Amino acid sequence: MQFEGGGQPISGAGGPITEPIEKGFPDLGTNSFFDYGVREGIPRLLDLFDKHGIKTTSFMVAQAVERAPQLAREIVERGHEAAAHGVQWASQYTLPEHEERQLISQCVAILEKATGTRPSGYDCYWMRGSVRTLSLLQELGFIYHNNDLNMDEPWIQDIAGKPFVSVPYTVHLNDIVAYDHVGFSAAAYEQQLKDEFDQLYEEGASRRRMMLISLHDRLSGHASRVRSLERFLVYAKGHPGVWFARKDEIAAHALRTPEITPRLHRELAEVGGLAANTAQREVAL
């Protein structure tokens, strides 16, 4: 559950109003669209999760938290994880090392002050970190990141001789892709969720599988969309052995069970090692 409303730029953030605004002027309509996530979307999603006893991870933009610290605190008080999503909607991969370290540290400080918890997971703006990001995250006490799209399960990287977990993200089950596009169908979206679940559940009989749904405060928190999400949650809960987990719980489980190595990692290791990813070597433990 992404907590972003309030961290977007005053203009140019993108939204349902497609008419471009002249440069230099605040996009008031689009900013009110983002504000919906704080005022209506997250509270409605929290009530849904409480109803079904499900705990989630909320990736929080620090500037959004500064504008609604009571909501960030409530998210944690209701049992959800507060994870870091940068200081604002801006890329960090262009920053020199000391500025990127400072940005991550600033995000940690803001979230810790508002929620009373220190984030252990990080999500870069549009998943685009620098070649140093993972090393900096490990240095600053994080245990996992959210910026891979390459697997349906967590996996462990070796960063500076220490284990660091990738808990992959999703694009195809991301509401930014699913909603507000020509031809969108709520029924088709629900069926996609069920098909994804059914396939992974079947595979889960013999290997570790993970399904992620990305919910943005200003999108999935709308009334009709919560109904679609609830119908899927009821469907998934009807299957034995399903674990609804926060991402920090998934990362901790991966660290406790390094012997469960993803199949592709085993195959690559057998032929002499793994390819570099974002200029950092991935090693299956």
Image: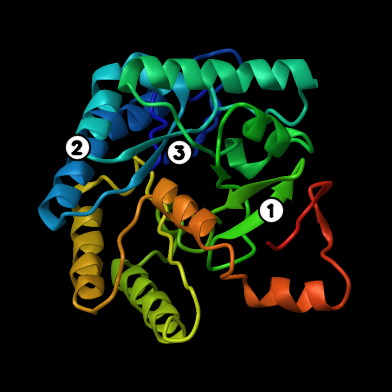
Residue that mark 2 sits on = 78
The mark lying in front, picked from 1 and 3, is: 1
Using the rendered image of the protein, determine whether residue 24 is visible from the camera's viewpoint. yes
Q: Earlier in the sequence, mark 2 or mark 1?
A: 2
Comparing marks 2 and 1, which lies closer to the viewer?
1
- Quadrant where the N terminus is found in the figure: top left
Residue projecting furthest to the right: 272
Q: Please say if 87 is above or below 160.
A: above
Tag on residue 84?
Answer: none
Q: Is mark 1 on a helix, strand or loop?
A: strand
Q: Where is residue 175 in the image (x, y as percent from the top left)?
A: 42, 54
Indicate which disc, 2 or 3, sits on the residue closer to the N terminus.
3
Cα separation, mark 2 vs mark 3, equals 29 Å
Q: Callout 3: helix, strand or loop?
A: loop
**Position of 54 compared to 66: left or right?**
left
Q: In this view, does 181 lie above or below 24?
A: below
Amino acid type at image mark 3: Gly
In the rendered image of this protein, does residue 221 appear above or below residue 177? Answer: above
| Residue 282 position in % (x across, y down) | 76, 56
Amino acid on which disc 1 is placed: Gln
Q: Do the residues labelled 1 and 3 touch (CB within 8 Å)?
A: no
- Work out how far the residue at label 2 is from the one at label 1, CA to CA, in angstroms: 31 Å
Q: In this view, does 65 lie above or below 230?
A: above
The residue drawn where x is 82% and y is 64% is: 274
What residue would you read off at disc 1?
157
Q: Residue 15 carries which label?
A: 3
Q: Residue at x 64, y 35 (%)?
A: 138
Nearer to us: label 2 or label 3: 2
Mark 2: amino acid: Arg
Q: How far apart are marks 1 and 3 (CA)?
A: 36 Å
